[in-house]
Amino acid sequence: MKAIINLKAEDHAVISKLIDINEGKTSSVDYSTTIFESLKSYNQTMNTIDGNIIGSQIKNLVETPLVAERGNQTKAYFSQPDKGVGFGYIFIDYIKKNPLLVLVVAKEGDDYKYSSCGFNKQTASWEDKKSVTTSASSVKELTDFVIINLSEDITSFAE
């Protein structure tokens, strides 16, 4: 089951953005102005990006209560065709299956922005984690940028 159904848009701006990406409520985009260059390239690249990002975090996840969403489907939530170049992930508590970390990467102006929020069990609320931008000029640069920031987010959950 996709963990997105356990999230409420009103709980945090990052969650709201992820839900908008998932439901196709984001703005249209001219793919020629992005590092993906075309919708076809974006679609083909997303599976590679997904595998690289999740695969890079296996070691970091072992030290935390986090796991990527389970199942045979892709772990990422991608923008729908012609609705931007955003994508995001939900990492869940491996025992209780509750979402604990949500992140979104989306094009904002000429840059790509990584935003994340984490669930604080003590306050029972979602809190800001990271909000950083890059002017990546290639898919590899963007993927590396996401991997670095996600690594920091995940290791912040180490117990």
Image (cartoon, rainbow, N blue to C red):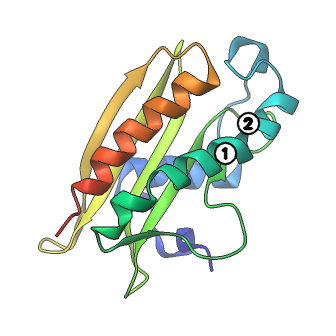
SS state under label 2: loop
Q: Residue 107: name its quadrant.
A: top right
- The image position of residue 29, as x and y in percent, is 73, 24
Measuring from the top left, give residue 101's x and y in whole percent. Answer: 37, 60
The mark that comes first in sequence, 2 or 1, is 1
Q: Quadrant of residue 67?
A: bottom left
Secondary structure of the residue carrying tag 1 is: loop
The spot of residue 72 in percent (x, y) is 72, 73
Task: Specify the quadrant that holds the N terminus.
Answer: bottom right
The amino acid at mark 1 is Lys
Query: In this orientation, which residue lies closer to the viewer: 131 or 9?
Result: 131
- Occupied quadrant, residue 10: bottom left
**Seen in the image, is 129 located left or right of residue 47?**
left
Residue 42 higher or lower than 134, as above or below: below
Residue identifier under label 1: 25
Q: Nearer the viewer, mark 2 or mark 1?
A: 2
Label pair 2/1, CB-CB below 8 angstroms: yes
Horizontal side, residue 20 vs residue 99: left or right: right
72 vs 106: above or below: below
Q: Residue furthest right?
A: 40
